[in-house]
Amino acid sequence: MYSNHSRCRACGYGPANVPEGIKAEDNGQRLIPVFDLGLQPLANDFRSEREEQAGFAPLKLLYCPRCSLAQLSVTVKPEILYTNYSYLTSGSVTMQNHFDRLFDDLGICQLNAVVEIGSNDGKMLAHWRHRKPELKVVGVDPARNLAQLAFEKNIGTVVSTFDREAARAANAIQPDLVIARHVFCHAHDWEGFIASLAIMGGPETRYVIEVPYVRELLDKLEFDTIYHEHLSYLSVRAIEALLADSPLALDSIQEYPIHGGAILLTLRRKGYSDTINPVVGRYLSQENFTLERWMEFSKDSCNRILELENRVELLAASQKKVCGFGASAKSTVTLRACHFSRKQIRFVCDNTPQKQWKLSPGSDIPIVDEGALLREQPDYCIIFAWNFADEIIAKNQPYLDAGGKFIVPGKTLQILPA
Ligand code: DWN
């Protein structure tokens, strides 16, 4: 199901896979454990009561003292995680607005062809082609079930994990932009990923990678974004370490609030431009993701988990009904970290058909439709999809009007209305 990972993906620091406790021949250079949630289910392994779950794997974060990259201690097999994938790119207004911002910021209107790596159900490519009907698009994604949904939108998908062969196939449309949104941090073979990107397009092609920014994770204690799909937690410094010996160079960086705070890295072929964008140097000088910072994150995150666990236990003890909203990967992490079962959380509402009437991974908590919130009118509802909290609160005003309260997890726990 998984393999152990002990050598830094960005800079190669650390031994080959030498078992912990055995002195490696290379003077004991090791990645340092900084956050450990123990054995955890796979965050998107939503199964019905009758189906067998994929299993559990260690969820432990390791820190590289050389380039500061944080990365998981194991790599779960991609075919287990993604062949039949429950996560659909959100159809929310928040996400549609993000697609429009990217369309404008990346100048998609002036382009002929776009390849998306990790294209999921083709939602973004379909949105962009709706704005520019003559845009040639193709996706790359390993999930057969999602490729079918993309096909129904008339979006072609190379059904494969992204590699050189998939890149050659997608390159048939000669893309002038290749975009990978929230997929690079899922990649185990970084060199292979960058080499596969460079197979596509031509001298002017832009390669755009959007990933959660580790500064936001540390600042906002986003511990629930740490799960087996996210193998690495990206800093500009780690990307620069990786690109040093690659055919691509970092050309520009933008930040967006999506998914709790993301950076958009634009890469170009080396030699495209002889001017170094000062923004890269600014990020490198500002980044300070030290071991001490990570140890503080771990302590503060454990306190956040305890605070939510105790708050909900008290509510359950006083016979209050509590549910969740947003059966996200984040909800799986939080429900397990807080040791919640149906005793504390009656159900979790979600609008994803592939998740409904199944169980939150590793628990007996059922996932139900959004309408259950009004039908059951629980006293409290925890918004696990906090990255969409504004939109979720706005669309559930009737629940609030009937006396319901939202609990919004974050660096500090919020209860609305106060
Ligand atoms: O990297 C990843 C990020 C980008 O997305 C993937 N590996 C996994 C996934 O993480 P997630 O599951 O935490 O993503 P979301 O988009 O935060 O999940 C939101 C969940 O909430 C979805 O299951 C849909 C649901 N939802 C809903 O039921 N009603 C969301 C909204 C906005 C709603 O109104």
Image: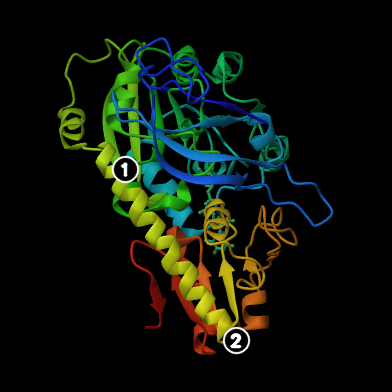
Dividing the image into 4 quarters, which one contains the C terminus? bottom left
Which percent across, then down, holds residue 264?
35, 37
Element under label 1? Answer: helix
Determine whether 59 is above or below 75 in the image. below
Of the numbered discs 1 and 2, the one sitting upstream in the chain is 1
**Which label number is shown at residue 75?**
none
Quadrant hosting ligand 1: bottom right
Q: Quadrant of residue 8?
A: top left
Give left or right: position of 282 versus 330: left
Q: What amino acid is labelled 2 in the image? A: Gln
Give left or right: position of 100 versus 139: left
Residue occupying the far right of the picture: 50
Mark 1: give few (<14), some (14-19) or many (20+) Cα within 10 Å.
many
Which percent across, then down, holds residue 265?
33, 32
Q: What amino acid is labelled 1 in the image? A: Trp
Residue that badge 2 annotates: 319
Question: Residue at left 55%, top 87%?
Answer: 318
Residue nearest the observer in this picture, 63 or 173: 63
Which percent across, then down, holds residue 255?
30, 43
Q: Is residue 216 visible?
A: no
Determine whether 29 is above or below 75 in the image. above
Dividing the image into 4 quarters, which one contains the N terminus? top right
Mark 2: give few (<14), some (14-19) or many (20+) Cα within 10 Å.
few
Residue that badge 1 annotates: 294
